[in-house]
Amino acid sequence: MKKIVVFSGAGISAESGLKTFRDSDGLWENYNVYEVATPEAWQKDPALVLHFYNLRREQVLNATPNEAHQCIPKLEKKYDVSVITQNIDDLHERGGSKNVLHLHGEILKSRSTLTNDIFPINETNLNIGDLCPQKSQLRPHVVWFGESVPNMDKAHEICKSAHILIIIGTSLNVYPAANIINYVDKNCLIYLIDPKDVFTGWTKNIIHIKENASIGLPKLVNQLLEQ
């Protein structure tokens, strides 16, 4: 059975109504990302950081998977499928995908600031005073700017066995996540689904589908299932 790896970014979730961070102005939902998404921001004003992610969490819970999320599990009928995502939402899981690796954490989970143990968030909000069993404050289980990406090694191992790599919703500008394209075999066939022009000089085995995620990916899935 051939291996397909789907590598997704913010663009796929944007089609479900989740706003994306834009490098051009440094703002995310009118917040300066360095004031809400860095370890320094957490040390300076943890209440503001928690408030920011509480708003994002509420948006995620109110969002629904789109056709791009929902068509990926269809590939599991014929292929060994793994999803590697930069997104912190759970739309891939709710769309039906079984094997999902989150590079940048999961907004519906919290993490102990003492032990790094991970816990589900049972309510919409995570607040000052919400503690782990060792009585340490819980923080959002997300990778902030300036922090390491602990799942990168797992992502690299998954990519090494890929026969087909599908890149969707990402311009491959976010590092180190974008480096995973360097870990697929030289004979791996790569599909890039993005309506915009994306620099693809790093590989020859690439097919650029200039469509939005919810249009281009279902077409590609049907094509791969017919092969």
Image (spheres, helix red, strand yellow):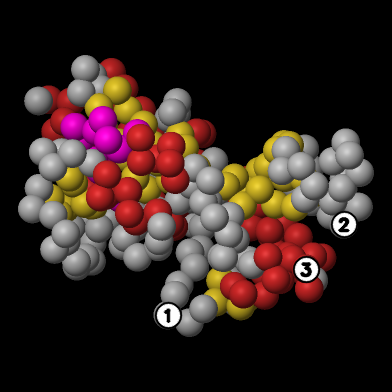
**Image depth: mark 3 or mark 2 in front:** 3
Residue 60 placement, left or right of 173: right
- Mark 2 is on which residue type? Ile
- Label 1, on which residue? 24
- Label 3, on which residue? 43
| Quarter occupied by residue 97 | top left
Residue closest to the eye, 75 or 150: 150
Q: Secondary structure at mark 2?
A: loop
The residue at 51%/51% (across/down) is 149
- Mark 3 is on which residue type? Gln
Residue 58 placement, left or right of 3: right
Q: Real-space Cα distance between discs 1 and 2? A: 32 Å
Residue 136, percent across and down? 87, 48
Would residue 15 be visible to someone looking at this image? no
Residue closest to the eye, 149 or 10: 149
- Please report whichever mark, 3 or 2, sits nearer to the chain's N-terminal start: 3
Residue 96, percent across and down? 45, 28
Q: Secondary structure at mark 3?
A: helix
| Quarter occupied by residue 212 | bottom left
Residue 98 placement, left or right of 165: right
Q: Residues within 10 Å of mark 3 (few under 14, many from 20)?
A: few
Would residue 13 be visible to someone looking at this image? yes
Which residues make up the magenta segment? 158-168
